Amino acid sequence: NARRWPLMIDPQGQANKWIKNSEKKANLQVIKLTDSDYLRTLENAVQFGLPVLLENVGEELDPSLEPLLLKQLFKSGGVMCIRLGESIIEFSDQFRFYITTSLRNPHYLPETAVKVTLLNFMITPDGLSDQLLGVVVAEERPDLESQRQELVLNTADNKRRLKEIEDRILHTMSSSEGNILDDANAIEVLSEAKIVSDEISEKQTIADATQLEIDAAREGYKPCGSYNAVLFFTIRDLANIDPMYQYSLSWFIGLFVRSIHGSVDKEHQSVAGDSDINDLRERLGVINDHFTYALYQNVCRSLFERDKLLFSFLLDSRIMQSRSELPEQEYQFFLTGGVGVVKKNVPRPDQEWISQKMWSETCRLASVCGAFGELPDDIATDIIGWKKVYDSLTPQRESLPGKYGEKDALSKFQLLLLMRCLRPDKVTPAVNDFVEQTMGKRFVEPPPFDLPGSYLESTCATPLLFVLSPGSDPTSALLKFAEDMEKADAISVISMGQGQGPKAAALIAEAADAGKWVLLQNCHLAPSWMPALEKITEGITVDSADENFRLWLTSMPSPAFPVTILQNGIKMTNEPPRGLRANMRRSFQLEPIANPDFFESCGKPDVFKKLVFGLAFVHGFVQERRSFGAIGWNIPYGFDDGDLRISVRQLHMYVNDNKKTPFDALKYATGECNYGGRGTDDKNRRLLNTLLAKVYQPDALTDGFKLSDSGTYAIPTEGDHESYLNVISKFPILPDPEAFGLHENADITKDLGHTSLLTETLIRASGGASGGGGGKEQLVAKITNDVLERLPPNFDIEAVQRKFPVLYEQSMNTVLAQEMLRYNRLLDIVRGSLLELQKAIAGLSVMSGDLEKVFDAFAIGQVPDLWMSKSFPSLKPLASYVEDLLARLTLFTDWYRNGQPPIFWISGFFFTPSFTTASLQNFARVNQLAIDTVDFEMEMMGMDPLAYPTPPDVGIYVHGLFLEGCAWDKDQKTLCESRPKVLFEPAPCVWLKPVLAKDVLVKKTYACPVYRTAARKGVLATTGHSTNFLMMMRMPTTTTEDHWTMRGVCMLCSLSD
């Protein structure tokens, strides 16, 4: 009835299915904008009055459709015409046009929205619950469902007949002339209508009564529909985490039906006709349990390892929320740490182990959850009891002090909240325990990679997709499986890339007819061909292809990958094993090391085999160290088996062709070319070369040479291939940080990284949601007002330049003006977005896409991307970021009012290199030296910046840095090992003293990189360094520089809290 053509938002394909069914008889034409001939199809349909379905449109429609969307019709030769493209065609009034998009949350601009009628076909919880109710009743009580379907048809038929009668009566009355009582025909029609109407009313009364009986019987099954609808919305939200995690509704319902059949036990086939409500509840419980686990197994198969526990927890928490067993405010606290919550005001105990962050979260928890209302006071009164929990290796299993240790004092989820405050590094194992206790052990034991099982579930029309991760290559496993299935000669492999599309299409067409297999590798490298692949897969049906045909695909996660293949195909992940032992074992089972002809062919077997073992350790080291985050590698490079393969072949050649082992050449080829060739960061290459210098050295050829300080990993004596595998099998399953040269605190860093990833991913899975709409708006409005009130006015640059003019001998004046300009730009963005957001929340302006992102970021306590695009680098949450910004602004306000400070807070600068360069420039100009001949000599001073009220005669004093990976010995003024559980230590004040580069004193120091944030990585700048890197600080040390390099020691300007 609408005047405009419909555009349906249809991520689950329900609108598509409905249109195809309802317009099947009318010869529906299905087109996509990616089809080369879609306009010709559309022209023919417009001319001959055929319905057209335009599928999978994006957020912008093709301009060539505009005349059709706006119905720009005109008369030509007495008939209605329309111009499409270059041609004018006749317009049939029978023509119908439908448009669908599979995007989940499209943003259509107003100019698009006014041309179409937008219809939201996204499934709602109630709608899906009703659908699943119909499915479970149809499977469990087919008698009820068929009766209901019959009733629906009868009711529709009765309504149609009533309408026909009404029309006849109206027609008779309007066409009757004179007195209607004298019209015999009219009276006959009215009498007949009365009889039929009574008859229909009687039937409808019976139908209504039957409907009530059916509804009452169906009501018992309602909890099953509601429960499983929650599961679908859980897996639907996984697409927010990774574009490859997409599942169709039809796949979900198919699995649900199979699960209903699979859950029927032999003794109790069904509860049809059984009036016992307890039996029905028991049966529904069996169905729900069986389906939940079946869904877990099927979805886990396609998830990366890092997301499997997260999925279990997401399932668990959503199920608990649907049963009202998990309060929303508790769940939100777990995700965000209580953003916007007014914390309970209790003074922090003067204990080193109680950090400010921990105490703030504990006080906010007391406000959020009644069970913890007195927690801050209880910790303050029982420091020893709570420190025992804090120091425990497994605090999540430790008995808690006082009333908190009593049975049922805390729910299992509340224990998670406590861990989030006290020991955030143990949240992941606590989540594991939580899922195990509430859902069962099987939900924390993901099913192993099962290629035969996935194959059995597939058909010739179902593509099988391997989702790749760095270092994984399932090709060899697939080729071996093809051999087992006697398909070794019937599988074609093609690696995708430029120009490979037509070859792949020809291979698929040939294989579909002949019943062969095709493997398309690395589909993410051919994004432009993906729409063509989607069309090809849609054209392959069970009827059109040989039943033995299979299409195998491999791809890294990519937003360009076709959604229909993701939703309807079978997805699998097969990641390389974790841990140093598993990695080394895998290296020894790969070509060429696993090949006995190669392994035993070297003329110097003792030298070669020892160095191969060392190289396998290096390969495991560089891959496994990535799990420690930035302290492991600044940039986590995708080192893979190809690096090991080429390095082993080079090692074989160099050892064989030289009388003396050329260690320098080996180090260069392996460290600078093979592995180092991936590196864009010179600090990473320094670490790699330090590691190789440890392995590629003459001492490595002695028996029992230690590869790690503890000696746990050592090079064994020469033996056969099997003997090396036996040595590797005795290594620990989970390596200690010392295996990688790291301090034991690195394990805490790694665990905190896992916790941070878990909560961030859960927030993404929830779409950034934070509680109910009204509460969310109040929270964001409060944050917006608070920040606006605290923001100072912009700096007056002209006044600054008058007071601190550009002077040849004082470059710091220029630095001050430039810094203020940069902060002004940031303040404009911050203030502007806050004012716009205020208006949008009040309903005075439109909430644009950018403002919506700012709103969502505020709701979860994060800094919006809009701000970060113009901001100094920062990893802080919103509240800390605002405090940091205000402190930086205060630094420059005080500088303007009181003159240059005696000691500079180095972290406060927007662009620090200009500040350090200005100091060198001042020295060079005063002494008439070239600036490239000048460098800093670094003198470590005391810890208190207030102890330096006057500036130095030469150079600058700086403070505000932090050490990561080590500590600072205040007495000896040298680097020392970190204290247990202390990840960051304040660095001393530093005197940066400009001198001639040739006069810099040579001391025993460690060249310590200084970074702006704990992320360490940045973008490669024109300076040749990362934008996150500032300078090398030469720190005094009593141990070797290599020791601190392996420790990953650095200095940071800003922490993440």
Image (cartoon, rainbow, N blue to C red):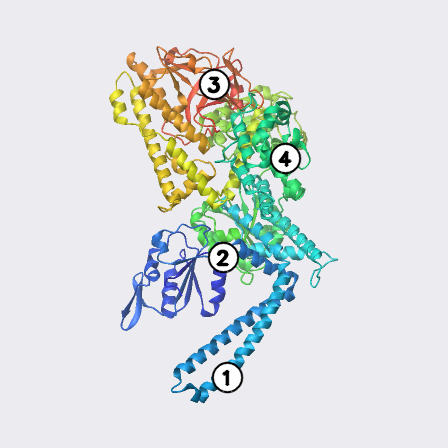
Which of the two labelled residues, at mark 2 and mark 3, occupies the earlier sequence position? 2
In the image, farthest residue toward the right: 267
* Label 4 Cα neighbours within 10 Å, binned few <14 / some 14-19 / many ≥20: few
Disc assigned to residue 987: 3
Q: Position of residue 167 (x, y in %)?
A: 44, 77
Q: Which residue is mark 2?
A: 13
Q: Secondary structure at mark 1?
A: helix
The residue singled out by tag 4 in the image is 596
Q: Is residue 574 left or right of residue 814?
A: right
Question: Is residue 274 rendered to the left or right of residue 618?
Answer: right
Front residue of 332/931: it is 332
User: Label 3 sits on what residue type?
Assistant: Ala
Rounded to the nearest whole Å, what is the CA distance between mark 1 and mark 4?
A: 100 Å
| Rendered location of residue 781, percent (x, y) | 42, 39
Disc nearer the start of the sequence (4/2): 2
Q: Amino acid at mark 2?
A: Gly
Q: Is residue 925 visible?
A: yes
Residue tagged by mark 1?
A: 191
First along the sequence among labels 1 and 3: 1
Image quadrant for the N terminus? bottom left
